[in-house]
Image (spheres, rainbow, N blue to C red):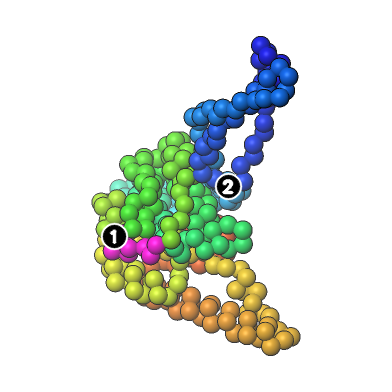
Amino acid sequence: MPAGERRRLTTLVRPARRGDRRAERVTVRSFGPLGLAARQGNHHVPWTVRVLPPFTSRKHLPSRLARLRELDGRTSVLTRGEGTEFDSLRAYVPGDDTRSIDWRATARQSTVAVRTWRPERDRHILLVIDTGRTSAGRVGDVPRLDAAMDAALLLTALATRAGDRVNLLAYDRKIRTQVRGRAAGGDVLSTVVGALAPLEPELVETDARGLSKAALASAPHRSLIVLFTGLDAAPIEEGLLPVLPQLTKRHTVLVAAVADPHVETMTHARGSVDAVYDAAAGTQTQAQRRGTADQLRRHGVVVVDAAPADLAPAVADAYLALKAAGRL
């Protein structure tokens, strides 16, 4: 660049992964008039770009919102559901459940009246993301933590549209990030996305007692606690199971784990000695995960174990099922 001129250089940078990207030094080298000597200097330009999580499960949101509208009675007749909230009275039509007849209201009028219910609203959802060493394991091209984030974002979008309150907690041995007191509204999802963007797994064993204590502090009211963690036998049996009664005593707990689809492929391998050993190893791994999941279910926990591509819609379906049953 000739002396005394000003020029602008534009460089397109495409981030490959979420997180905070900070500026490097800008180096300027200037040459003398004869080109025999030069001097160089570095300039620090402070700026940061935050790359947000991709939210690939957004494509499943319209179908789950349609199911939510059906539960909420916007596209179908309000029905009776265990633990749901009373909505209104209407005239009896053939096919209605006779248990929903309101005999007092019927006695006051000339027609048979039935009660209608709607799914509970303004419930509390606490998303707890385990950022310990198990979340660093890669399934395909991304860590398990990223699949858990994607599922958390879909559940956040769905729960806020359902009128529920969503809180977020990321923990391993200390709180890594937290979103508290977010009422249903349009800014909840963007707040959760911004909190998850710089989160990275820590290569430490998760403190289950500390996680339980932090979850209880973040959920003073009865809540649905969705715990994104692994289903490895040792961390669950030695860490989570001893403190699980503290969570299930007052709250509904859902454990969501990322399964490796390669293990499923291994179980079908045949044709050589190595393939048979792979099949045995895959079958044993699946049996251990099923055993761990059964232990959690015996404590009243809802367990979702799915591949990364299927985890987000599976967690959303479990949430809708709990909401329909009035268990939130």
Secondary-structure class at tag 2? loop
Amino acid under label 2? Arg
- Which residue is labeled 2 in the image? 17
Q: CA distance from mark 2 to mark 1?
A: 30 Å
Q: Residue at position x 61%, y 58% from top?
A: 141
Q: Residue at position x 68%, y 14% from top?
A: 3
In terms of depth relative to the viewer, which is nearer, 285 or 166?
Answer: 285
> Is residue 73 at all visible to an observer of this figure?
no
Residue 117 locus on image (x, y percent): 39, 51
Residue 44 locus on image (x, y percent): 51, 29
Residue 35 locus on image (x, y percent): 72, 23
Q: Nearer the viewer, mark 2 or mark 1?
A: 2
Mark 2: few/some/many CA within 10 Å (<14, 14-19, 20+): few
What residue range appears in magenta?
204-211
Is the residue 53 above or below the residue 264 in the image? above
Secondary-structure class at tag 1? helix
Q: Residue at position x 58%, y 30% from top?
A: 26
Q: Quick one: quadrant of the C terminus?
A: bottom left
Mark 1: few/some/many CA within 10 Å (<14, 14-19, 20+): some
Relative to 318, is 183 on the left or the right?
left
Q: Is-magenta flag for residue 207?
A: yes
Residue 215 locus on image (x, y percent): 31, 55
Q: Residue at position x 68%, y 19% from top?
A: 32
| Proximity of marks 2 and 1: CB atoms separated by less than 8 Å | no
- Which residue is labeled 1 in the image? 210
